[in-house]
Image: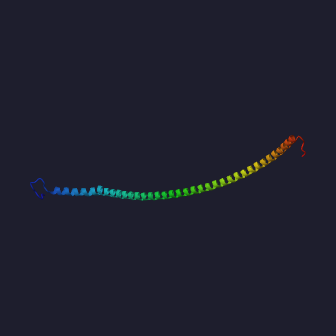
């Protein structure tokens, strides 16, 4: 059966309708077998990529929070170390002052003791020199007077 007959290069007959139906069936099968699974895989990939992007953003925020927390702890540790260093310096200064005071007292006591010992020695030497001077004076007077003096 011939629907239209023309002398042109294209002829429309029942084979064209069968080819059109075959093509539509082919499109339906291809859609079911290839296109729909590809679309679902593509959607799954996009969802997975979005999830990864969200996780990445959340991880970046967490990292920022951890960095801030570390900086706070670092600042706190620095402040604590500074306070400890100041306390140690103050304690060292007080201890040094105390050592200096004790040393000065000991030096003063040693100086007094030495002064006392030197004074005692000087007194002994004076007594000794006085005795010798008296003996020499008596001897000189006896020689000058040419007689013996009685003591």
Position of 135 with respect to 69 (left or right) is right
Q: Position of residue 12 (x, y in %)?
A: 14, 57
Looking at the image, the residue that sits furthest to the left is 7
Q: Residue at x 16, y 57 (%)?
A: 14
User: Where residue 31 appears, x then y in whole percent?
Assistant: 27, 57
Quarter of the image where one finds residue 94: bottom right
Image side of residue 103 versus residue 148, left or right: left
Q: Quadrant of the N terminus?
A: bottom left
| Of 54 and 4, the residue lying toward us | 54
The residue drawn where x is 77% and y is 47% is 122
Residue closest to the eye, 57 or 127:
127
Left or right of 66? Residue 14 is left
Residue nearer the viewer, 113 or 88 = 113
Quarter residue 43 falls in: bottom left
Give the residue at the far front of this rendering.
145
Q: Quadrant of residue 83?
A: bottom right
Percent coordinates x, y for residue 22 in the rendering: 22, 56
Q: Is residue 59 left or right of residue 125?
A: left
Colouring scheme applied when the structure was drawn: rainbow
């Amino acid at each position: 059966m011939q629907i239209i007959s023309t002398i042109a290069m294209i002829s429309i007959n029942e084979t064209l309708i069968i080819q059109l139906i075959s093509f539509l069936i082919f499109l339906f099968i291809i859609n079911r077998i290839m296109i729909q699974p590809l679309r679902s895989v593509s959607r799954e990939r996009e969802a997975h990529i979005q999830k990864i992007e969200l996780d990445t953003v959340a991880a970046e925020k967490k990292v920022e929070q951890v960095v801030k927390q570390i900086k706070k702890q670092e600042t706190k540790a620095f402040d604590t170390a500074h306070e400890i260093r100041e306390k140690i310096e103050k304690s060292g200064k007080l201890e040094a002052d105390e050592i200096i005071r004790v040393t000065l007292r000991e030096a003063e006591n040693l100086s007094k003791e030495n002064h006392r010992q030197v004074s005692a020695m000087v007194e002994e030497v004076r007594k000794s020199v006085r005795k010798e001077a008296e003996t020499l004076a008596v001897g000189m007077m006896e020689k000058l007077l040419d007689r013996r003096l009685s003591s």
